[in-house]
Image: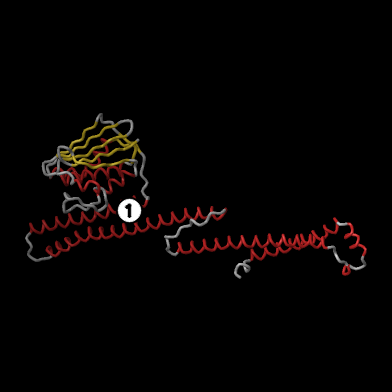
């Protein structure tokens, strides 16, 4: 039997047999000691081979032997039962490690096995959670790669087309200038996409260390809107900033927050018609510093609001040049700084972003 080939069982069995022999002999000599006639008869004979112990002494010795054997058998029975449960537990764990996540460990309700079962249940729950997380990450990565491939392939196709047109002989100077400008825009678009994706990957990987410095909202807005001033001027859009007292501030990373705010302003600029306006206002209280960015464009479709900050999501009112990554990058940056962002439609028309930098 495999049970008796276990080294631990062999040692335990030998120990029990040794104890059985010891207690049997001890009971025999105790019987001789307690019965004077048996003791005198034992000591009077010239040879022990001729000694015949009384039946009471033999009965005591056999009783001791029988009790020891009963305890040995009971011990072996309980040990064998426990080893069966442990073996079954090991088989179940092996099944889980080989992908069977339907097993439960509800049959173990005794002593150490119960404690072990609880710990294994915890481990099993954690393994299932990790497996689900890995599956979700794999699906997300696959979807993201498909989106990235699509976003890069579209301008690349246009670049190839523009290059083929530029290579034609006798192309008019004005058309060549227009195609060159279009080529520059497409290359800038790819450059921005790759840069934004790199920033997102660094934030997701946790390799970005965000500073905790005192940031004045007025300086932050000025830094965020500066790269967009020429584009706004070409579109004849008006930009204004109002603060409660001009001293609103919060603790965060100036450069990364300017990046996040710049993406929001860029989104408003792209969805505001020529001659429109983009407004930024700020206020502060004991709980948070509030920053509101709004425009007078078409606003958001109601069904787009819940998914507006998802990566690569493009709403109904998005333009052809939209990639669907700017708002996602802004939310990721802000969430790393104990800030929240919410998008909604203005009652008078247009989009509104509300940012809270909590203290």
Q: Position of residue 296 (x, y in %)?
A: 15, 40
Q: Identify the element where label 1 is drawn.
A: helix
| Quarter occupied by residue 29 | bottom right
Residue displayed at 32% across by 36% down: 250
Outermost top residue: 245
Image quadrant containing the N terminus: bottom right
Residue 48: where, in percent of width, then height?
88, 67
Image x and y of residue 16, in percent: 70, 62
What residue is drawn where x is 26% and y is 55%? 194
Locate residue 189: give its quadrant: bottom left
- Residue at (12, 42) in percent of width and height: 236
Instruction: Confirm whether residue 15 shows in the render.
Output: no
Seen from the viewer's position, the closer of residues 186 and 284 is: 284
Does any portion of residue 320 appear in the rendered image? yes
The residue wearing badge 1 is 201
Does 138 sit left or right of 27 as displayed? left
In this figure, what is the number of numbered marks? 1
Q: Position of residue 359 (x, y in %)?
A: 35, 35
């Amino acid at each position: 039997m495999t049970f008796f080939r276990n080294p631990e069982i062999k040692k335990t069995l030998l120990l029990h047999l040794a104890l059985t022999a010891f207690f049997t002999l001890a009971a025999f000599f105790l019987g001789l000691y307690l019965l004077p006639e048996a003791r005198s008869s034992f000591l009077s004979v010239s040879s022990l081979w001729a000694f015949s112990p009384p039946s009471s002494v033999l009965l005591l010795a056999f009783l001791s032997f029988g009790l020891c054997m009963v305890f040995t058998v009971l011990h072996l029975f309980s040990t064998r039962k426990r080893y069966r449960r442990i073996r079954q537990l090991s088989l179940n764990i092996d099944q889980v490690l080989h992908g069977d996540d339907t097993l439960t460990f509800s049959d173990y309700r005794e002593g150490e096995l119960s404690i072990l079962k609880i710990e294994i249940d915890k481990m099993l729950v954690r393994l299932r959670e990790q497996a689900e997380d890995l599956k979700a990450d794999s699906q997300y990565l696959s979807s993201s790669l498909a989106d990235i491939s699509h976003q890069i392939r579209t301008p690349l196709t246009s670049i190839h087309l523009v290059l083929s047109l530029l290579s034609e002989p006798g192309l008019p100077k004005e058309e060549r200038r227009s195609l060159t400008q279009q080529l520059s825009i497409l290359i800038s678009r790819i450059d921005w996409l790759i840069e934004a994706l790199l920033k997102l990957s660094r934030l997701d990987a946790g390799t970005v260390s965000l500073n905790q410095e005192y940031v004045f909202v007025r300086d932050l807005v000025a830094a965020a809107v500066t790269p967009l001033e020429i584009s706004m001027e070409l579109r004849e859009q008006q930009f204004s900033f109002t603060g409660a007292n001009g001293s609103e501030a919060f603790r965060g990373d100036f450069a990364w927050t300017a990046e996040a705010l710049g993406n929001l302003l860029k989104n408003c600029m792209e969805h505001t018609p020529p001659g429109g306006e983009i407004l930024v206002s700020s206020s502060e209280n004991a709980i948070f510093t509030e920053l509101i960015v709004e425009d007078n464009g078409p606003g958001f479709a109601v069904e787009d609001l819940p998914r507006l900050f998802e990566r690569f999501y493009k709403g109904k009112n998005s333009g052809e040049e939209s990639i669907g990554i700017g708002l996602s990058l802004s939310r990721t940056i802000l969430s790393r700084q104990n800030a929240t962002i919410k998008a909604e439609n203005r009652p008078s028309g247009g989009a509104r972003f509300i940012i809270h930098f909590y203290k």
